Amino acid sequence: MKYFLQLVLAGLTKGSIYALIALGYTMVYGIIKLINFAHGEIYMIGAFTALIVGGALQITTGLSPLTILAISLAAAIFFSSGYGVTMEKIAYKPLRNAPRLTALISAIGMSLILQNYVLLAQTSDFLPFRSMIPNFPFLTPGKSLVTTTQLVILITTVVVMVILTLLIKFTRTGKAMRATSQDKVMAQLVGIDINKVITFTFAVGSATAAIGGVLIANHTGQINFYIGFLAGIKAFVAAVLGGIGSIPGAVLGSLVLGMTESFGAGYISSAYEDVFAFIILILILIFKPSGLLGRNEIEKV
Amino acid sequence: MILTFPIMVIKVNSYEGVVLWRWKNLMWIGIGTFFLSWLWRFLLDRKENGPGESKPDADRDGKFSLRKALGERKVKIPTLAVLAILVLAFPFMVKFYQVGIMTSALMFVILGLGLNIVIGYGGLLHLGYAAFYAMGAYTYGLMYLYWGLPFWAALPLGAVSGAVFGIVIGVPVLRLRGDYLAIVTLAFGEISRLLLENMSGFTKGPEGIAQIPRPGFFVKLSLQGATTYLFYICIVLVLFAIFVIRRLEDSRIGRALEAMKEDDIAAQSMGIDLAKTKLITFALGAVWAGMVGVVLAAKTTYINPGSFTLMESVMILVAVVLGGTGSIPGVILGAFLVTLIPEYFRALADYRMLMFGVALVVMSIFRPQGIIPRVRKRYLVGEDKS
């Protein structure tokens, strides 16, 4: 029973991280109908920034771990959003009216660029990431079911989700975002600057991905330039699973995916962990292409 | 510029707790961004205002005359003859090492041509192409391992297994299009690689299959002889591929593919069986990958799942996009560029993938049709086809 609960928790943790990344996918897709292949890279950059800033602070100054965590998290969010927005300006904006295949190829190119940029500028090795989250005193490591990091990840995810939902439901910008995703031309007609909305979407999506990156780096303890790719694909799977374009769908999909992986790895074979994710993706796309909570699209000629 | 700051300038060595400040990089980035952004804006401007000015006309004229010249018999036959002699004599003119590289480049050309059928004609973005490639290689590897099958028996079998695998992958993804298709093919590619890696009992897992024999020409050939032999085999395969694809273009299937690429719903209403056409596309594309896989296994005598990663699929995609989707000469050029540039500029090898990424983005923004764009056939009423 304990094993089962541990698997549930591991699945939830994984799912939360996927959810943080999947949000970016789903938001971007909802607005410009583009699969942002480079989104996983943004998440990786977030983790790297946190590592660098956090590491530099840890070594040079004697600040308390929590302060360092806060500063590096802020830096990660800031830089990731910056990269996200710049990426949109360079690679996607000129292609907004181009065929979708072209934009997709551009996105693949962007993903390669970012990956290799980090590879060349940093290193190809796995970098150990010193956990910056202090242990809560009420959880004894090894004894309690949940570790501090897992708890922090779960709480953070919930908080981010709530903030995001509020943002989209109740603010002016959120309204503008929803309008843009429904009909770009109409949105422009009623005075919405869609360029601004798109930029904002990329910034928010990248910020959540950065939070995910920092958390996972704290959780697994090591990062390298390649982590973004697999995480990106899986988050995409999660987004599709829940119905791409739908925010609650992305969260639900991520949790389902995290659980499946965790149980698959726990009860069947850990070597096939990634295979489970892909199989789920294929099954979902075959049987319910619009995802669990997605709207059915009507095809028009 | 500010954005690149942490990653470029600070390098944290968390093993030893050392922070390296790389201020020098900052300067380079500053200079680089300044000029690049200037160039970028200039190019974007030109792209927006360019067409309709005087320049494209001159450009077009030049191209047309070149094409026309190549089209005339007088010029065409000698050119082809010289090319043929050059190609045939190639292994004897250069070093053995070069022949090896050329063979890889030719293999890539075939892969590119195969993927081109799927992407260029069918308009289906396929990111799991390396899986077909692996299928071919493993067909030969495993058949040799268990039954001692020779190269020439494996080559058609590789093609068949590629095609079968293409259909197997094709069936579930029939309903998907565009982005979803790309992702699912990617997923299939990764699944097959992971399966190859993990079914250690059957496929030897990550360590791969070693000591696969090179093909013999009646007798067992030396290493050098076998490589040259493979070079010729590749040439024949390339020619065969070009021949088949050119015939395909004009065939009923080719036109069905064209229609499907443009608009699948309209194509369906014109009586094209989408499911069948898509499957044919996948199968036709996969056949080539299967064959090249067999050649690869024979050339390197060793295969393991690590040779068939997503990067391989992406490289083939780069070749196709760079050269020009749908255009045979374009794809050939693209494949040569992708394989030969890293080979001859070893110093740039580290930057290879970065360059490819830049190439993909730049190409899709400024020249989505590729270096040598495809000449679309026009069917006009009342004009004789020349």
Image: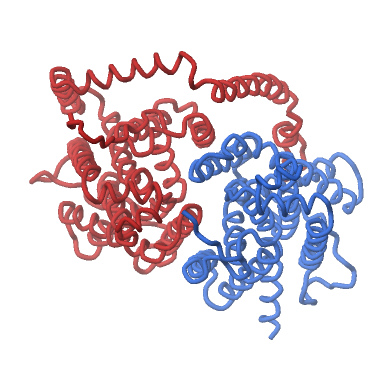
Tell me if A2 is positioned left or right of B53 in this view: right
Number of marks: 0
User: Which corner quadrant of the image does residue A168 belong to?
Assistant: bottom right
Task: Provide the letter of the chain coloured blue.
Answer: A
Dividing the picture into quadrants, the one containing residue B274 is bottom left
Q: Is residue A287 above or below residue A40?
A: below
Where residue B335 sits in the image (x, y, percent)? 35, 35
Question: How far from the left and from the top, in percent, is residue A141?
Answer: 80, 71
In the picture provided, is A92 more to the left or to the right than B246? right
Whether A106 is drawn above or below A155: the answer is: above
Q: Is residue B54 above or below residue A162?
A: above
Q: Residue at x 66, y 47 (%)?
A: A184
Residue at 90% across, 50% down: A67
Instruction: Please provide percent x and percent y for residue B276.
Output: 30, 61
**Can you say whether B147 is above or below A55 in the image?**
below
Q: Is residue B209 shown to the viewer in this render?
A: no
Outermost residue toward the front in this view = B382
Residue at 67% x, 24% y: name it.
B33
Placement of the N terminus of chain A among the 4 image quadrants: bottom right
For the point 37% across and 31% down, which residue is it? B373
In this view, the residue in front, A187 or A60, is A187
Q: Is residue A73 visible?
A: yes
- The chain drawn in red is B
B302 left or right of B225? right
